[in-house]
Each structure stands twice: as C-alpha cells, then as structure tokens.
Image (cartoon, rainbow, N blue to C red):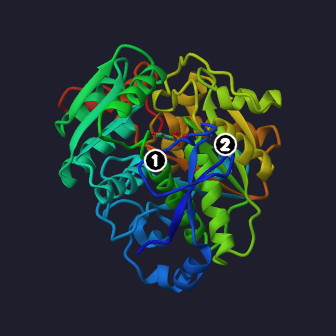
Amino acid sequence: MGYVTGLKCRECGRDYAVEPVYVCEFCFGPLEVVYDYKGIKKVLTKKNIEKREQNLWRYKELLPIDGEPQVGLESGCTPLLKAENLAKELGVNELYIKDDTVVHPTLSFKDRVVAVALTKAKEFGFDTVACASTGNLAQAVSAHGARAGFKRFIFIPATLEPSKIVASLVYEPNLLAVDGSYDDVNRLCSEIANKYKWAFVNINIRPFYAEGSKTQGFEIAEQLGWKAPDNIVVPCASGSLLTKIWKSFKEFKEIGIIKELPTKLFGAQATGCSPIAAAMKQGTDVIRPVKPDTVAKSLAIGNPADGFYALQAMRESGGYAEDVSDREIIDAIKLLAKTEGVFAETAGGVTLACAKKLIETGKISRDESIVLCITGNGLKTQEALSGHMASVHHIKANLASFEDVLKGLKT
Ligand SMILES: *Cc1c(COP(=O)(O)O)cnc(C)c1O
C-alpha cells in the first residue's frame, strides 16, 4: 500500500479523499497530495533507493500510487551531465545539465508525469485517458496510453509544430486540433472533463500527475551525491515543474535523505509568453494572462495554473525569474549543441538563455553549483531552427571537388 494520506486544498487547507478531483469545492484552490512522511522515512533510505532499478519509480513511496507502478517502467533516470565546455563559455565553476532529452520513450520530461498519471488512472479504474497539451504531453499520453491499453483523446492547439503532430498521430489516438490557443484548449477540456468520465491527466488527475515532476528533482539530488544544488534553472509553462522540484528537495530534507537545502530556484520563460517572469520582475503576486507569441510553443501557456505557486517557491528560495527573446532561444539551442553535444528543443534554449542572463546580471553566483533543466529533445522542434543554421557544403563525388571546398574551411 502507498503512503498517501489524502488530498488537501492549498488555499483553505480542507481535506479531501483520494479521488479524481482537483479543485476545492469551497474556495476553488488547487488540491495537493499529502503523504505520511514518518512512515516513508522508515522505508525510503539512500541504500534502498540505490539498490532499485534505474527508472523513476525508484522513489515510489513519494509518488501518489497505492499499488505497484504500471506505466513508465522504462522512463526516468536521465543523465546529469557535468558541462565543462559550457561552464567555460559562461564563466562559471560548476555547471550541470539534467538531460531529459534522452532515455524517455517520447524524449521529454512529460514521460515522468504521464507515468504517474496513467498508473493512477488505472488504479481509479478509468478506461479512457485525455489531455490538453502544448505538444509534449500529447505525445507522452498517446504513447504510454497505447502501451497501457487506454482509449485516448488528445487536444492540442491547431497551430502546433507539424513534427509534434506527427509524433502524436503515429500512436493513433483521437487527436483533436482546436482553433485557438492552449488556454482555449484547456478551457474546453475542463468543460469536457465535467461531462465525460475520462481521466484528463492535467485536469481531474492533475494533483497526481503533477507529482511525477518531483522525480526530476529526486534524481538530481541523488546524482549530485545526495545533495541539492545551489541554483537550479527550470523552464516554466504552467509553473508546475518548478513547484514540484522545490517540493522534491523539501521532501528529501524532511525524510533526512539530504541534510541541507541551499537551493535557489530560477524560472525561465520566453519573452513572448512570460506572465510568471513578468510578475516576478514587477514584484507582484498577480499573474496577468498574456496571449503567447513565441517559438517556444511547449512553454506557451498564457494563463499558468501554478504561476502563483511558482512565484512563491522562487521567492521563498531566494531565486528569481528571467525571460528571453526568440533570437536568444535559437542561439542558446546552438550553443548547447556546440559545447555539450546536446540537441534541445526550444524549451531547452529558453533555460540556457535565461541562465546566461541570470549569471551575467549576478543573480546566479559564478562560484556556486548550477543545474540547468533541459526538458525536451531538439528533434521535436526542428522547424524553429530553419533559416538559422549554417549551410551544408555541396560537392561532386570526386576528390578534386572536395579539396576545392576544403581550402575554404576552418580545420
Ligand atoms: C510541459 C513542459 C515544461 C514545463 O511545464 P510546466 O507546465 O511548467 O510544468 C517544460 N519543458 C517542456 C519541454 C515541456 O514540455
């Protein structure tokens, strides 16, 4: 049996039973999973974790399931790369890349949240799963849902990158492209979720789904030798990943797995959709919804559900938020590829470009450890790079033609 004791409203503190519910009936606050940390502390030790298989379920006591994991047994435990070339480029001492562009079957961190959401959907007895997505979630629900035998309804904004549409369609879900922004899609899905008995992973299953993001934080702490980093830069769409990374470090501290929590959290957004960074810079708690206009479509949520809590986490930790232009995003994608051999999608460009700004402005100290969360693979957003790449060298199939061109190349 699991260690979840119930759900709790983040605003008024009212308790709820473990059911597919997500908002407080009284104050409309979001519901959060509550655990029995005393019980967990007895069983979840560093030694026990180290003996377990290399997947995200190695921290299962801190995930909201009752039985055994059923989905995503091949997801998680992505590399933490020591990024020495990039560190030199940025002028910092200790830099790491949490590389969620690889290992996961659908090549983004959404495999983490979907593993947990679909296991929970099975426990609740749903036969149909659904989601509102900016792209990566669509692919993860389509793929994991196929393998787990669910019927699938996937809702996306019609303007999504063509390669992301193909990457979902190949698993043959019911894919619905909605005329409108992600925020329109999400509103429509809330209405549908009220009417149909489906597990909408990021609506009625959201409290459980969101917990899956914690595994990224758990892994980082384990890979640093059971230590939380001094600084971590996290891309923000709804703001959920950032709040859950904070929760993961706090939980590890609570159960004694890490001793100290020095971490400052930094949110990263594209200027064309930066409601969280704007609120941070203006020193307010109020998130003003925006109409997204950026190449970073996976982060294009204009009205972020967890924006308020992301701000709270950043402020509590002594961090900050930053935003960057599309041009800076593209340059950062290229810099990461050139220095560390990692091809990130646009969200990864956002993270690195914001980190660069935060270092240059002194918000992140050059002497402290820094982790960059690189959350999705560049093969998913190749369109964003068109027109920004060096061109290929065309030659004839003979040595003379090659040597002609070679003269003009840097060697
Ligand atoms: C969904 C997503 C995020 C962050 O999303 P949150 O809603 O803030 O949790 C970050 N990067 C990528 C690539 C994503 O797909």
Q: Which quadrant of the figure has residue 246?
A: bottom right
The percent position of residue 75, horizontal first and vertical second, equals: 35, 59
Q: Which quadrant of the figure has residue 266?
A: top right
The percent position of residue 27, horizontal first and vertical second, equals: 64, 38
Which residue sits at x=68%, y=62%?
Answer: 229
The percent position of residue 314, horizontal first and vertical second, equals: 73, 46
* Mark 2 surroundings within 10 Å by alpha-carbon count, few (fewer than 14), some (14 through 19), many (20 or more): many
Which residue sits at x=61%, y=32%?
Answer: 269
Q: Is residue 409 left or right of residue 350?
A: left
* Mark before the other along the chain sequence, 1 or 2: 2
Query: Residue at label 1?
Result: 342
- Seen as rendered, the residue at the extreme front is 26
Examine the rendering and report whether any part of residue 390 can be seen.
Answer: no
Amino acid beneath label 1: Val
Mark 1 or 2: in front is 2
Considering the numbered disc 1 on the image, is that residue within a helix, a strand or a loop? Answer: loop
Q: Quadrant of the N terminus?
A: bottom left
Q: Is mark 2 within 8 Å of ligand 1?
A: yes
Q: Is residue 6 above or below residue 329?
A: below
Q: Nearer the viewer, residue 399 or 183?
A: 183
Q: Marks 1 and 2, how far apart in space?
A: 27 Å
Q: Is residue 33 left or right of residue 155?
A: right
Amino acid beneath label 2: Ala
Query: Residue at label 2?
Result: 310
Which residue sits at x=46%, y=53%?
Answer: 208
Examine the rendering and report whether any part of residue 206 can be seen.
Answer: yes
